[in-house]
Image (spheres, grey):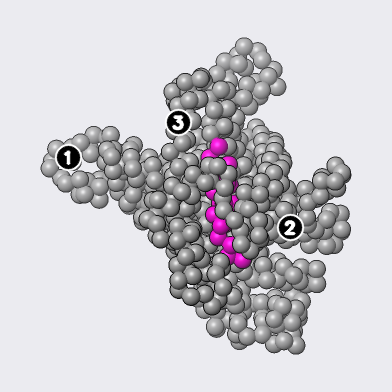
Amino acid sequence: MSQATVPVLLPTGFGSDVSNADREEARRRRDEWNAVDQSVRSQSFWRDTGKRFLQNKTGVAAAATVLLLALAAIFAPWLTPYDPLLGEPTDRLQNIGSPGHILGTDEQGRDMWARVLYGGRLSLAAGFIPTVVAAVVGTIIGVTSGMLRGVVGTVLMRFMDMLYAFPAILLAIAVGSSLGPGLTNTIIAVTIVFIPPVARVAEQATRRVVVQEFIEAAHLSGASRFRIARSQILPNVLNDIIVYASGLVGVAMIIAASLSFLGLGSAPPAPEWGYMLNSLRGSLYTTPLVTIVPGFFIFLTSVAFNMASDALREAMDSRL
Amino acid sequence: MLRLIIRRIGLAIPTLIGVSIIVFILMTVVPGSPEAGLVPEDATPEERQAIRDQLGLDDPLPLRYVDWAIAALQGDLGHSQQRRREVADLLTQAWGNTFILALVSAAFGIALGLLLGYLAGTRRGKIADRFISVVSLGGLSIPSFFLAIILLGIFAGGLKWFPSGGASFDDPITALRSLVLPVLSGSLITMAITARVTRAGIVDVFGADFVETLRAKGLTEFEVRRHVLRNALSPVLTTSGVQIGALLGGSVLVETIFRWPGMGLLLYNAISARDLVVVQGATLVIALTFVIINLLVDLLQAAIDPRVRGAIA
């Protein structure tokens, strides 16, 4: 099974699911577009990327969905009169569309719409924070070991390889059960799972860059190694890392939801989507539609992130 | 080839040791006192200390690791107080069940993924390709436990076609029936990833010069595709090792939902009961299985593909 859902994703070879033909296609479209719109040629890479991204309808729809979900989570108190933690025992397991409860109620009579909205805060945090932290830490480790080929670099990457030797979900479970339940611990666990793959991507990209002539030129000009890392290497490896990390947000959400599904995530009664799905499992045969609501939102968010990530990859035309 | 096998196994040993150290440390830094479950509530500090000494809990960490690792090598993974069983016994039973499930899921997911990836790759840009892309993106994004619950609701609850859980190997028909839903829930992601990788491989190989040569030689389209497929399979093989490992790790969720008596269910119950000896043992065994599978896949790949052989040796 794949819980692996999640886990499976990570170890897949970096970019191995994108064919050269697709890359060429993206490049061709970019050149075509640049040729048409002369005025933007001199603009920065990021503006170009942004404009190309905006032309991809799927990407825009996906990004809009993510934005909408985030806004709904942030403004949850304005969107529902109910308290996500307080239920009305007489209103237990109302079906979808029952009066006053658009998405029904759970096994304790709590409004599902309210729980989904507030739960979005936890689930989105669990998707974003580990990805961002792991991207930063993994980049530092990867660039360091890519530049210093000696003992330090080897030891760092060997250690990363060892963490990498675990199926992702299993490592998260092991770290999670070691730290104990809680949203913070889930975030730490997912971050630890993500650091090795990001470091590997950063290291590979760094190795491609360090052999180029402008790095040698920088060395000859007397720049310190830290300065070279910051101003010569980092800008050249950042694309790869951003594209890779953007694909991790959906994975992070699923791992975090898996942990709370197993009782290792945010503590009940907090409305985390994975935990909600598990606690509603018992009512699968009575109110099936209500039961799948939290799962649907995990799926929707994860699809949206994955589609946005694919579109971003195409717009940036990185070497992926 | 023999030198390569030895070299590759040599590389796997430090990884195995590293994995065991990580598992050991994770389960040792756990907050709370490990002897708590072993002594009576009203034990005197002296009694507690006696237990701690007996378990070696006050020894320095490296020493404790070595003791633990030597015992583990001899097949002793500790004793579960909660289950009143040797951890190794619990794991041996569960390992087989998980392995069957993971293997069948991997075979099903990879076969279906190859087929879809092949169809998409040979019809690049056509409707079939787009449709398969959407399906595999969905497959990547759906959490296995959510899919499991949906399948359970439809096929076990509503239609009653398949049992809602448990494993039964009494007769082949029941065994197959109890495998269907867990395999479907687990293998969708495998299918999705395999399809994406196969498609990318096929599209790339079709663009290679040798395909032109084959056509110029007058081979039929069927024969050309056979050559293309063989060349596109290498990355698929690489990911398939990872897939089986992921299926092993991911088994925790699917097995929990379908009450499949494997390592995943064992791990889930141990986590709920805070039975850390079992968590430690199960994590170790799953991770070791994963390392060994990847080793086998690497070797298999080297045996099949001379380019890989050159790269490793």
Whether residue A291 sits left or right of residue B232 in the image: it is right
Does residue B257 appear in this view? yes
Image-based side of A128 in relation to A94, left or right: left
The vertical placement of A222 against A135, above or below, is: above
Q: Is residue A57 visible?
A: no
Q: Residue at horizontal 76%, vertical 76%?
A: A95
Using the image, determine if residue B60 lies above or below residue A281. Answer: above
Chain at tag 1: A
Amino acid on which disc 3 is placed: Gly
Residue at 66% across / 23% down in the picture?
A: B226
In the rendered image, residues at marks 2 and 1 fall on the same chain: no
The chain carrying label 3 is B
Do the residues at pointers 2 and 3 share their chain?
yes
The residue segment tinted magenta is B272-292
| Vertical order, B81 against B119 (above or below) | below
What amino acid is found at the position of numbered circle 2 in the picture?
A: Arg
The span from disc 2 to disc 3 (Cα, nearest Å) is 38 Å
Marks 2/3 in contact by CB < 8 Å: the verdict is: no
Numbered mark located on residue B259 in the image: 2
Q: Which is nearer the eye, B75 or A259?
A: B75
Q: Give the residue pinned by disc 1.
A: A219
Q: Main secondary structure of the magenta part?
A: helix
Q: Going by the picture, which residue comes out furthest to the left? A: A222
Indicate whether residue B285 is drawn in magenta. Answer: yes
